[in-house]
Image (cartoon, grey):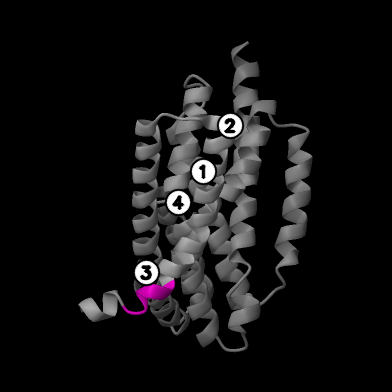
Amino acid sequence: MIDIIFEDITHTITEVALAIVPLLVFFFVFQVFFLHLEKKRIFDILIGLVFTFVGLVLFLQGVEIGFFPAGEAIGETLGEQENTLLLLPILGFIFGVVATFAEPAIRIMNYEVEKVTAGSISKNVMLITLSLGVGLSIALSMVRIVVGFPLWYVLLPGYILAFVLVFFSSDRFISIAFDSGGVATGPMTVTFITAIFVGTASVTEGRDPLLDGFGMIALVALTPILAVLILGLLYQWKERSNS
């Protein structure tokens, strides 16, 4: 078991080092010429970088030996079931909601939104809104695998609708909405859900894992934008009804 867990971990360590070392070099350059931080502060930052390095290595290694194989196995099992047109969208919606609740970046953004808005936009409301949006995108992506329609059939009208909603939604929700799309495409969605889609497409007759298994992330980036903009419309309607 230990051998499986740490299999080819040197490759993961190298990839993480290539990502973190340039940041460390930039930090020391700024420290020498601009920051001039105290030694204790530098020590704390270096300790944080060590934790970051170890955490990234463990996470990426877990993705390689756990998330990807498990996701593909689940996807292949689901793709072999009967009534996939009904089953897959329902399970996809559930996967999307659960993955969003587990997404650390979303929780951080929701906390910041609640803090900056002095609680007028609750983090729980944001979490539910984004979860429903991501769940809808995963469900649509599952329908796309079963039916086989092109990705732009959803993306083009979706982004047109988003830009139309910009002119009607509350101003404070517009920036939050477009940030939400990027935050929703975090490690849980990219690692686990993508593997499920590739596995499902690989066992679905007439589907290509490369053409049909990917593209889900684009939908995940779109639907939270629409969900938050609609939330802005609801807040706007509520404010007008109370005035």
Q: CA distance from mark 1 to mark 2?
A: 10 Å
- Mark 3 — residue? 61
Q: CA distance from mark 4 to mark 3?
A: 22 Å
Q: Amino acid at mark 4?
A: Thr
Using the image, tell me which numbered label, if any, was put on residue 100.
4
Q: Secondary structure at mark 2?
A: helix
Q: Is residue 163 above or below residue 78?
A: above
Comparing marks 3 and 2, which lies closer to the viewer? 2
Label 4–label 3 contact, CB within 8 A: no
Q: Work out whether mark 1 precedes mark 3 in sequence or the reverse, and give the earlier one.
A: 1
Comparing marks 1 and 3, which lies closer to the viewer? 1
Q: Work out whether mark 4 precedes mark 1 in sequence or the reverse, and give the earlier one.
A: 1
Q: Is residue 80 visible?
A: yes
Pick the quarter of the image with the N terminus: bottom left
Rate crowding at label 4 as few (under 14), some (14 to 19) or many (20 or more) other CA atoms within 10 Å.
many
Name the outermost residue toward the top: 243
Q: Which residues are magenta?
A: 7-11
Q: Amino acid at mark 2?
A: Phe
Rate crowding at label 1 as few (under 14), some (14 to 19) or many (20 or more) other CA atoms within 10 Å.
some
Q: Is residue 43 above or below residue 213?
A: above
Give percent across and percent down for residue 198: 52, 77
Label 4–label 1 contact, CB within 8 A: no
Q: Work out whether mark 1 precedes mark 2 in sequence or the reverse, and give the earlier one.
A: 1
